[in-house]
Amino acid sequence: MRLLIKQRVFSWSDTYDVYDEDGNAKYFVKAEFLSFGHRLHVYDNMQNELGLVKERLFTILPIFEIEVNGVVQGRIEKKFSLFKPKYEIDFNGWRAEGDFFGWEYDVYSGCSAVIHITKELFHWGDTYVIDIVNPADELMGLLLVIAIDAANCTEDS
């Protein structure tokens, strides 16, 4: 199964539309406009909130917590590195390997790849493709990509 994440370019805050492989709108991601740090809410088509990616404040490097139904499920922490971005992922028992800087990486559960993430180039706004092996991992995979994108955005600004 595949999701396509497209960032809205002309928006006051970080806003993403998420489509399934047939081009149907599936999720909507919207940042709180007047908040300190990133707070990105993930909604389904019926505008039910499914998850939240929020930045911990007062840290040297970006740290993002991922919540589902108000319960923290894990975190993504950007680590210091000179050339290639590195992350410590404590989320869903997963680990990620690949070229984060070029946005070509895989997420593993144990020895098995569960998600492949690619950033598409030459688009207005960020555009990502997420290939998910198990449909049950769809929401968690989406939250992971949103958290890593927010960590990259925080460091770039």
Image: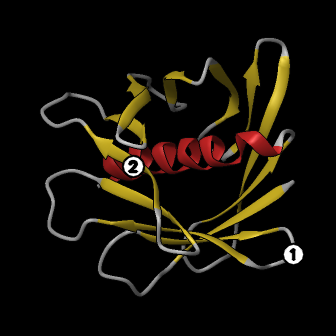
Residue 76 seen from this side: no
Using the image, determine if residue 26 lies above or below residue 106.
below
Instruction: Write down the residue under mark 1.
Output: 22
User: From the viewer's perspective, is 71 left or right of 45?
Assistant: left
Dot 2 alpha-carbon crowd within 10 angstroms: few under 14, some 14 to 19, many 20 or more: many
Q: Secondary structure at mark 1?
A: loop
The residue at 32%/73% (across/down) is 13
Q: Which mark, residue 89?
A: none
| Residue 155 pos. (x, y %) | 33, 44
Q: Callout 1, which amino acid?
A: Asp
- Pick the residue in front: 69 or 81: 69
- The residues tagged by marks 1 and 2 sit, at their Cα atoms, a distance apart of 25 Å
Residue 2 in the figure: left or right of residue 30: right
Q: Is residue 115 above or below residue 118?
A: above
Residue 21 lies, in percent from the top left, at 85, 68
Q: Is residue 63 left or right of residue 44?
A: left
Q: Is residue 62 above or below residue 35?
A: above
The residue labelled by disc 2 is: 52
26 on left or right of 74:
right
Farthest bottom residue in view = 10
Q: Residue at x 87, y 40 (%)?
A: 133
Closer to us: 66 or 117: 66
**Residue name at image x 83 percent, y 27 percent:** 113
Q: Where's residue 74, x and y in %? A: 45, 26
